[in-house]
Image (cartoon, grey):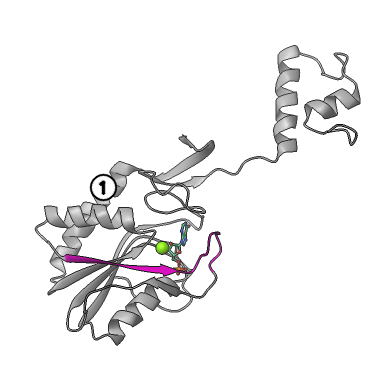
Amino acid sequence: MPKVRGRTIRVLFDAETIAARNLEMAAEIAAAGYRDLLVVSILKGSFVFAADLLRALHDVGLSPEVEFIQLSSYAAGKVSSGKVKLVRDVESDVAGRDVLLIDDILESGRTIAFARDLMEKRGARKVAIAVLLEKPGKLAQPLATDHVGFVCPDLFVVGYGMDAAHAFRGLPFVGVVVERRPRIARAAARGSRARRRDGRSRRGAGGSRRESRARAGYRSRREP
Ligand code: IMP
Ligand code: MG
């Protein structure tokens, strides 16, 4: 498993799998026959997916205009605040146009519903939705998607544009950060490995309870 920023990442969707699916999605989008298409990438999380999907669209003969909108609902944590905020708007007039919203991952659907409603209010002829990942069963309200890359397990994923507190966006794959074992469990595992190596108990090898606590990372109150 790859190690990034000192953390182990379990890969869920690797780069080759994503690239192949992007091409399929591009073909689907081309076949949908959108007219006067404006692609709107929802920042920040979709920037990698949007960049790759746009180049896949080029490969299937589509050259849409591209815009960006920045929405926020997650602050810097892993739990959605439930309220979507418009951080940066598109510059284009969308009235009468077909708009394809691109996002990284669909969870409650609030982010995309906000963007869709905004585009519809401004008179877009049609608003379609493309997401790389969809976590099933999490929608706050019904929402119809048009192009979905993969169904994603109900885990907090990172990479390929998606972040945990702004880290891991540059990974070329989508994965999950493996939880660190608590310090005490790590120390216990170290101790049992050492015991296995010695073929005897560390305490039996002469260590006092105080010494073994110190090895396990405890500090005496008197120590600095
Ligand atoms: P929704 O509004 O609940 O559908 O959340 C969608 C937005 O939350 C996405 O655009 C992502 O930026 C972010 N998000 C949701 N789930 C994850 C995740 O597992 N990892 C990283 N970002 C996520
Ligand atoms: Mg996002």
> What is the count of numbered marks?
1
The residue stretch that appears in magenta: 65-80
Percent x, y of residue 196: 72, 18
**Tag 1: amino acid:** Ala
209 left or right of 116?
Answer: right
Quarter of the rendering containing residue 37: bottom left
Residue extending farthest to the front is: 224
Q: Where on the picture, by quarter, is residue 211? A: top right
Q: Quadrant of the C terminus?
A: top right
Q: Position of residue 166 (x, y in %)?
A: 47, 53
Read off the residue under disc 1. Answer: 19
Please say whether residue 96 is one of the residues in the magenta stretch. no
Q: Is residue 42 above or below residue 220?
A: below
What is the x, y in percent for residue 69? 33, 69
Point out the residue furthest to the left here.
61
Side of 224 relative to 96 (left or right): right
Is residue 75 magenta-colored?
Answer: yes
Quarter of the view holding residue 60? bottom left
For the question of whether residue 143 can be seen, the reply is: no
Q: Is residue 203 above or below residue 99?
A: above
Identify the residue at horizontal 42%, vertical 72% (top origin). 111
